[in-house]
Amino acid sequence: MLFVIGAMAALSIDEVTLYTARSEAQLAADAAALAGARVLANSGTTSDTSGGSMLSAQTIAQTVAIRVAEQNQIGGKNLTAGNVACCVFGGTDTNPTVTVKVQRTDLPTFFARIWGVTQVAVAASATAEAYNPSGASV
């Protein structure tokens, strides 16, 4: 009985660590998507009825989103550009969206190693919209 309770307590430590890492991944994805959407909104491209400035604004938004994501940690490890899948642009030219996916596949476990699980993966994604309240359509 003592062994079973000890094993459950040990696994709960790994589970809490995993949930914390998942929360950190979500925060990193949220921050990166919001930063990318802010770049699109501030660039003026949502008011450009020709749509000509969208590509350059998306390039800048992608760079900013990756830089913001890299400033975060998941499970105590810094994110790199390889951990960030950025960006999927969607929506319309007047209300573009930015979707960012963050993933970390090499988070160590502590007590789950007993069963042969030495690393776990966490991932999160977030979508933000650069809303143009003027209602101008392209």
Image: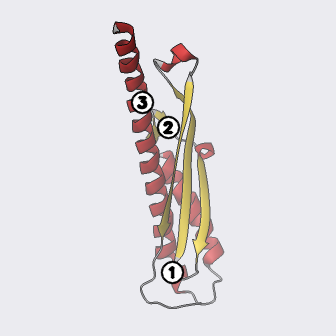
In the drawing, what numbered circle is on residue 15? Answer: 3
**Is disc 3 placed on a helix, strand or loop?**
helix
- Residue 131 in the image: x percent, y percent? 45, 78
Q: Is residue 60 left or right of residue 26?
A: right
Q: Which residue is mark 1?
A: 44
Tally of marks: 3
Kindly check if marks 1 and 3 are in contact, taking CB atoms under 8 A apart as contact.
no
Image quadrant where residue 105 sits: top right
> What separation in Å lies between label 2 and label 1 (alpha carbons)?
32 Å
Query: What residue occupies the far top of the structure in this picture?
Result: 2
Q: Nearer the viewer, residue 77 or 122?
A: 122
- What residue appears at the point 43 percent right and 89 percent down from the top-left corner? 134
- Quadrant assignment for the N terminus: top left
Category of crowding for the residue at label 2, using alpha-carbon neighbours closer than 10 angstroms: few (below 14), some (14–19), many (at least 20): few
Which amino acid lies under the numbered mark 2 shown in the image of this protein? Asn
Horizontal side of 74 relative to 54 (left or right) equals left
Q: Amino acid at mark 1?
A: Gly
Foreground mark, 3 or 2?
3
Q: Is residue 116 left or right of residue 71?
A: right
Could you tell me which secondary element the residue under label 2 belongs to? Answer: strand
Image location (x, y in percent) of residue 103:
56, 43
Disc 2 target residue: 78
Q: Which x, y percent locates residue 10?
A: 39, 18
**Do the residues under discs 2 and 1 have CB atoms within 8 angstroms?**
no
Upstream in the sequence, badge 2 or badge 1?
1
